[in-house]
Every structure is written in C-alpha cells, then in structure tokens.
Image (cartoon, rainbow, N blue to C red):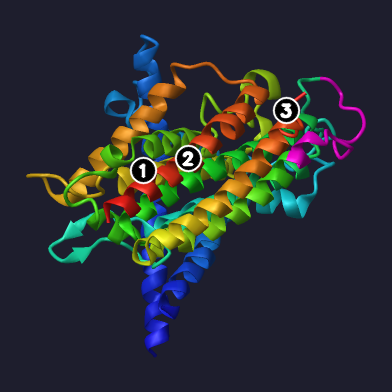
C-alpha cells in the first residue's frame, strides 16, 4: 500500500529531473544575447504600458466558488459509489436526498443568475 | 534494502514512461496532428524530413533545443520557470494508473492504485495550476487572460468529468483501473453508460484545451494565451504536457468505456493502442472540424447542460442498479 505511493512520489521527483534535463542542455548550448527590446513583454508589437498584474473580472471567482461547492459533493459521491451495491436501497435513498438538496441549491444559484456570464 | 530496490525500480519505470510520453504522445501526436489536419484540409502536411515527413517533429525538437530561453524583464522569474515543469509532471503522473495491456497474467501497469481513477482525476487537475501560474507570471495581458480563462474552464469541466467517472465506478464497484477493465468482460461500459461516455468525451476535450474548447490559447485573439511569452524548450515542455495529457485522457476513455485491453484475436497491448489512438483521432477530427466556442457558451455547456445531465445519470444508474439487485 505504502509502496504504491512511493512509486507516485518517485514519479514526481524523476519527472521534474527529466523535465529539467532538456532545460539544462539548452542552458549549455543555446546562444545568449540581451538587448532591451528582446526582454520586452510581447503585445502584438505595441510597446506595452502598465503591468498585467491588475484587477480583473470578478466572474472568474464566482465560478471557482460554485466549483468548490460541487467538488466537495463529488468527493462525497466517490466512496458511496463503491459500496452502495452492498448497502442496498437505504444507501440509495440517502444519497438521493443529499443530491436533491444540492440540486435545489444549484437551481437557486441558476435562478439568481450566478451562472450567467455577462 | 528492499526500499532502495523499489525506488530504483520506480525510477526506471518513470524514465521509461517519460520517454514513452515524449515519443508516442508528443512527437507522434504532433506529427499525426499535422498530417491529419493536412488531410482534412486537402493539403499534404509535413513531407520532407524522413519518409512521409515522419522525422519532422524530431527535427523540430532538435531545433527547439538550440533556442534561447528568454525571460521577459517584467516576469516573475521563479514562477515563470516552474510553470512548465508543473504542467509536464502533472501530465506524467497520470500515467501511473493506466493499464496498457496484459502479457499472460502480468498486467502492464506501473501501480494498480486502489483509488486509481480518483487519483487520475486529481493529478490531471493539477495542470490548471501550471497554466494559471504560467499565464500570471508572464506579466503579459494576453497570457493572464488565457490563464484565467483556463482556470474557469478546467474547473468547470472537472465536475462533469467526475460525474462520468462516478457512474462508471458505480457499475464496476471499484475505483481501480484494472478492476474497471475486468468488469467489462461481457459488455463495454460505453453501451451501458452512453450518456456518461458522451459527457466524459466532451469534458476530456475541454480538460486538454483542445478546439472547440481552446479558449486559453485562442491564437486569433490572445496570440498564444498562457504560453505567449515562453520560448524554446519551456514552450516545448508545455506542448509535451498538453499532448501527454491528451494521450492519457484517450487512454482513460479506453479504460473506462471501451473495455481497456479486451478484444478478440489481436494481442491485448495492440487492442489498447488501437482504441486509444482511435480516441486521439476523434479529438483531432473534432479539432479540425469545429470553430471555437465563446466563453459564455463554454461555461453554459458545462454548468447548465453537462452538470445536471451528469447528476441525473448518477441517480438513474443508482436506481437501475438498486432495482435490479
């Protein structure tokens, strides 16, 4: 069991090393030359003004908020999906109630316009 | 001692899988993409390097190895350099649980995790972190927009993807990829769960940022989106991550719905690759046939169509399985 996750960890570490390897080769053999225009941010040829790190549309946050809600729901569904065959009709009814409540919340969010992109 | 041996074995597997992903997913994938797009658009595609241009992507890789790595002056250097690594490693991690086939009794899988498909969904969603940080750290307005779009798109389509996976897990009674393939001994799940299959395919295309869901890249409006500022090998790592993820998603479609390595006459490995590349071909076919969606259409499709459908599919599956017991 623990060995399984050892493999995953080794995959992560070796993956990083193997991805760094071509970057190291590039560092060794690539040409280098710096002048101000080259290090400029590319914005279709126009000299960029200001920073890109500024305020942006709040809608992206709204969707991530709705996502957190439903992602937690999905996490609860996983263990249920594995064992519900053994637990029988009671487990199914309980999950039905759980999903129905969430579905109501979903319809509420929909009606309130939280899922609209304006 | 045994731990050292296991680590050595795991490292060897990692090197093999990484090489496999680089050659079969990225190099062959890009070549196939260019050839198929050429075929669909009634032109020839790459032709000059090697027979039928098969060595074109090798030549491209060698070219990219000689390119300078430019970091824009305004970029956040540390985050800028880490982002491509996150994307590549996250795509690679998904390969741990893919069963490639069977030789006798030996199943060709790195590790048969008991929560295999959940693990796959979890690590493939790590890609969004790489894309978002890459877009943000470039300090480029196009890149930031691409990164933000990608964040909202990937998280929106993760939910339908999860619902489709859960419907399959309910039928198989397990989250291990090997058990799911074994559960399809008689009937493939694509016939028992056609709706989940459709949802999974659409969500998989969206998760891999492919047209009609390629808003994060959107060449014609955002230059190249989140990787607009990346050059040379860092750009190549993003490409590698993207194509590796596409092959992993196609392989997962095969495992979940198309019976994995099962099939008559031919050896199991061959069956797995035929099915996987058929799904890859489907993704490419869609890419070169449909135009890009608008962002409101994209989010509506996920939240107002796929999500309720996925939920109803789970309830329907639960009802049928409970009643049939």
Quarter of the figure that contains the N terminus of chain B? bottom left
Task: Give the residue at the far right of this rendering.
Answer: A50
Q: Is residue B132 left or right of residue A79?
A: right
Q: Which residue is mark 2?
A: B312
Please tell me which of labels 2 and 1 falls first in the chain: 1
Residue A35: x and y, percent? 82, 35
Chain containing mark 3 = A
Q: Are marks 2 and 3 in contact (CB under 8 Å)?
A: no
Chain containing mark 2 = B
Q: Residues within 10 Å of mark 3 (few under 14, many from 20)?
A: some
Chain containing mark 1 = B
Closest to the observer, B177 or B227: B177
Which segment did they paint magenta? Answer: A46-62
Q: Is residue B242 left or right of residue A63?
A: left
Q: Is residue A9 in view from this perspective?
A: yes
Where residue A75 is drawn, which disc sits there? none
Please tell me which residue is depicted at 59% across the width and 21% down the height of the picture.
B293
Q: Which residue is mark 3?
A: A116
Q: Residues within 10 Å of mark 1 (few under 14, many from 20)?
A: many
Would residue B259 be counted in the magenta stretch? no
Quarter of the figure that contains the C terminus of chain B? bottom left
Q: Residues within 10 Å of mark 2 (few under 14, many from 20)?
A: some
Where residue B253 is drawn, which disc sits there? 1
- Share a chain, discs 2 and 1? yes
- Share a chain, discs 2 and 3? no
Residue B243: x and y, percent? 46, 40
Residue B214: x and y, percent? 57, 28
Please tell me which residue is depicted at 13% across the width and 49% down the height of the picture.
B267
Q: Is residue A37 above or below residue B120?
A: above
Q: Quadrant of residue B97?
A: bottom left
Q: Secondary structure at mark 3?
A: loop
């Amino acid at each position: 069991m623990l060995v399984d996750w050892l493999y995953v960890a080794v995959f992560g570490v070796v993956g990083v090393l193997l991805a760094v390897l071509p970057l190291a080769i590039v560092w060794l053999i690539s040409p280098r030359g710096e002048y101000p225009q080259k290090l400029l941010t590319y914005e279709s040829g126009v000299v960029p003004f200001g920073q890109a790190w500024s305020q942006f549309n709040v809608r992206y946050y709204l969707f991530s908020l709705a996502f957190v809600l439903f992602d937690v729901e999905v996490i609860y569904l996983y263990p249920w999906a594995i064992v519900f065959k053994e637990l029988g009709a009671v487990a199914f009814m309980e999950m039905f109630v759980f999903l129905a409540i969430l579905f109501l919340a979903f319809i509420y969010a929909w009606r309130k316009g939280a899922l609209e992109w304006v | 001692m045994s731990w050292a041996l296991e680590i050595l074995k795991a490292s060897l597997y990692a090197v093999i899988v990484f090489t496999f992903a680089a050659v079969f997913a990225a190099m062959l994938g890009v070549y196939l993409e260019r050839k198929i797009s050429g075929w669909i658009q009634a032109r020839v595609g790459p032709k000059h390097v090697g027979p039928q241009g098969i060595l074109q992507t090798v030549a491209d890789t060698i070219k990219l190895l000689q390119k300078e790595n430019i970091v824009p002056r305004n970029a956040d250097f540390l985050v800028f350099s880490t982002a491509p690594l996150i994307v590549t490693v996250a795509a690679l991690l998904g390969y741990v649980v893919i069963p490639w086939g069977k030789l006798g009794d030996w199943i060709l899988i790195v590790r048969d995790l008991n929560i295999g498909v959940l693990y796959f969904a979890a690590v493939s969603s790590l890609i969004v972190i790489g894309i978002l940080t890459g877009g943000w750290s470039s300090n480029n307005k196009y890149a930031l927009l691409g990164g933000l779009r990608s964040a909202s798109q990937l998280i929106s389509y993760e939910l339908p993807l999860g619902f489709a996976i859960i419907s399959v897990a309910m039928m198989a009674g397990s989250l291990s990829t090997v058990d799911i393939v074994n559960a399809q001994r008689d009937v493939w799940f694509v016939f028992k769960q056609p709706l989940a299959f459709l949802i999974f395919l659409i969500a998989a295309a969206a998760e891999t940022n492919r047209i009609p869901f390629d808003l994060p890249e959107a060449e014609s409006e955002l230059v190249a989106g989140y990787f607009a500022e990346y050059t040379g090998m860092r750009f190549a790592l993003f490409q590698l991550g993207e194509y590796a993820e596409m092959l992993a998603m196609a392989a997962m479609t095969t495992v979940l719905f198309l019976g994995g390595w099962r099939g008559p006459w031919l050896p199991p490995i061959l069956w797995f690759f035929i099915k996987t590349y058929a799904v890859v071909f489907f993704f490419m076919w869609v890419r070169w046939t449909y135009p890009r969606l608008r962002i409101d259409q994209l989010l509506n499709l996920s939240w107002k169509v796929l999500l309720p459908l996925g939920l109803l599919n789970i309830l329907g599956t639960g009802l049928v399985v409970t009643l049939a017991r």
